[in-house]
Amino acid sequence: MSEDKEKVAPFIEHLVELRKRLVIIVVAVVIGMGVAWNFSGPVLTFVEKPLTGKTYLTEIKKMVYAKVKERAPQLYTRYKLDQEINAPEKKRPLNYSAPLEPFFIQCKISMLLGFVLVLPVVFLQLWMFIAPGLTRKERRMVIPFITAATITFCAGAMFFLIVIWPVIINFSLSYEAEGLQSWFNISSYINFCLRLILIFGLIFELPILTLILSRFGIVSYKILAPKRKYALLASAIVAAFHADLITMFVIMLPMYMMYEISIWVALIFGKKKAVAPPEPEEGATA
């Protein structure tokens, strides 16, 4: 009976410690949400920009169509490419159909912004939770860990907003026709965007997680490298939860690329096994 109590006690201590860290994270996010509240409007405006139909993809199309006009003017005229690149910006305002719906959307945007603002606090609490299992030398890596984890999450979020989000919206708007017009609901639009921001932020954290696990000796290059096909399958399954093929592809590809980077992180920074000293040959004299 005493042995069972001894086993349960450390588990309870870990739960208490985890609760403490989670409480600190929640309080930090609430404070960050208050700070970020006034910035939610500009963020919403930035997220709405692709709805005008004018994105970085428009500039790429102009360069490509200019080459087509130069090398194949007949195709340029037949498919009326000039009308596509010279199309005026179209206003597609977001709509809401429930009382206080914009207010709750502002709360969600502010919460995500607040979470991003306090990412150093979040990662510090995670580090302090796992720190008892680290060596003294590894505990000194707290600042590089927090810095790298914060930067990679923000890089993933910005990569999505700047590169991927316009692609998704542009693909969606391509279905507009004379009898089919877009009518985006603000909740569906913003919830979809915020969910993908979190997904891409977490995807870019994969190399950092691999770095920690490889330092513990839990994963290694030899474990990760042969499982590329399973990683590709897992990436496709996770991405398949999103409705359209384009969104699935733009989630699957970065996720798998992060897995490839993680393999090399494990190879370069993974825990090296100690080389056993050669055993003395039998019959050797002292």
Image (tube, grey):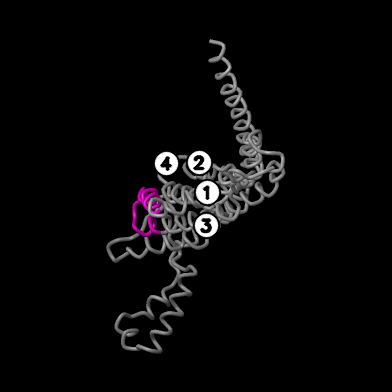
State the image coordinates of residue 119 (x, y, percent, origin top left).
63, 45
Question: 135 or 101, which is in the foreground?
Answer: 135
Q: Which mark is on residue 98? A: 4
Q: Which mark is on residue 104? A: 2
Q: Label 3 to label 4, Cα distance in Å?
A: 44 Å
Instruction: Indicate yes or no whether the magenta region holds residue 139.
Output: no
Determine which residue is flagged by label 1.
220
Determine which residue is flagged by label 3.
261
For the stretch drawn in magenta, the main secondary structure is helix
Q: Earlier in the sequence, mark 4 or mark 1?
A: 4
Q: Earlier in the sequence, mark 3 or mark 2?
A: 2
Look at the image and tell me whether residue 61 can be seen. yes
Q: Where 22 falls versus 67 (above or below)?
A: above
The residue range painted magenta reads 232-249
**Label 3 vs label 4, nearer the camera:** 3
Q: Label 4 to label 1, Cα distance in Å?
A: 51 Å
Q: Is residue 59 left or right of residue 243?
A: right
Q: Earlier in the sequence, mark 2 or mark 4?
A: 4
Q: Check disc 1: other Cα within 10 Å, few if <14, some if 14-19, many if 20+.
A: many
Residue visible at 57% across and 21% down in the picture: 12
Which residue, as the protein is rendered here, is positioned at the far left? 179
Q: Where 156 falls versus 117 (above or below)?
A: below
Look at the image and tell me whether residue 37 can be seen. no
**Label 3 vs label 1, nearer the camera:** 1
